[in-house]
Image (tube, rainbow, N blue to C red):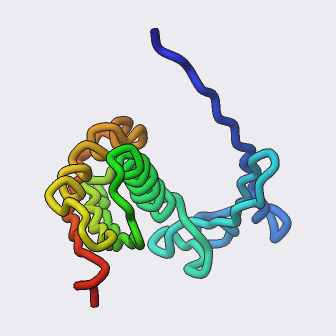
Amino acid sequence: MAKEHSYAAKLIWTGGTRGPVRDYAGYSREYSVEISGKPPIVGSADPLFKGDPALHNPEDLLVASLSACHMLTYLSDCARAKIEVCSYEDDASGTMVLKHNGGHFSEVTLRPRVVVAPGSDLAKARALHKDAHAQCFIANSVNFPVTHEPQVTEASHAA
């Protein structure tokens, strides 16, 4: 039986304090996301769409969400498999295609670099990336490919 979990976020356009929307070039894209009990996220549009390059944009956050979901699922799978993970970093990237007045993501690539304890089963640690990908809630919710190019090394051999 499926269990449902609900999530809520309040989005506030804070750019309105700098003036109303009158034309495309002249209004602030700044916003705040509030999630109960958590610090707010301050964001803007991508600079391509006249946003503030110093702030998070929805496209960055989508790539970060996919990366974080994969990592958390992978670490959980490693814990169950008794594989000791010493460090994990990901250089994730995504491509957005613009068409007419819209666009879409065409792909996101995750590049996790994992260091495991000496003596770990490296083949199993590598294989768990495939399992994590199949289980990731966010990757299962998007309509574009999410690929992964993991590197797994032992702590004694890590640079």
Compared with residue 104, is residue 26 higher up or lower down, i.e. above or below?
below
Residue at the extreme front: 119
Residue in the image at 27% along x and 84% along y? 156
Residue at the extreme right: 17
In the rendered image, residue 74, in percent from the top left (x then y), is placed at: 36, 52
Q: Camera-side residue: 41 or 123?
A: 123
Residue at the extreme bottom: 159
Residue at the extreme left: 123
In the rendered image, residue 41, in percent from the top left (x then y), is placed at: 69, 62
Q: Within the image, what quadrant is residue 142 found in?
A: top left
**On the rendered structure, is 92 left or right of 48?**
left
Q: Camera-side residue: 86 or 142?
A: 86
Look at the image and tell me whether residue 116 can be seen: yes
Look at the image and tell me whether residue 102 can be seen: no
Q: Camera-side residue: 122 or 150?
A: 122
Q: Give the number of marks.
A: 0
Compared with residue 140, is residue 52 higher up or lower down, i.e. above or below?
below
Q: Within the image, what quadrant is residue 90 found in?
A: bottom left
Residue in the image at 47% along x and 14% along y? 2
In the rendered image, residue 71, in percent from the top left (x then y), is placed at: 41, 57
Residue in the image at 41% along x and 38% along y? 137
Q: Within the image, what quadrant is residue 94 found in?
A: bottom left
Compared with residue 14, is residue 142 higher up or lower down, i.e. above or below?
above
Residue in the image at 31% along x and 79% along y? 155
**On the rendered structure, is 27 left or right of 24?**
right
Which quadrant of the rendered structure holds the C terminus?
bottom left
Which quadrant of the rendered structure holds the N terminus?
top left
Compared with residue 37, is residue 86 higher up or lower down, i.e. above or below?
below
**On the rendered structure, is 102 left or right of 11?**
left
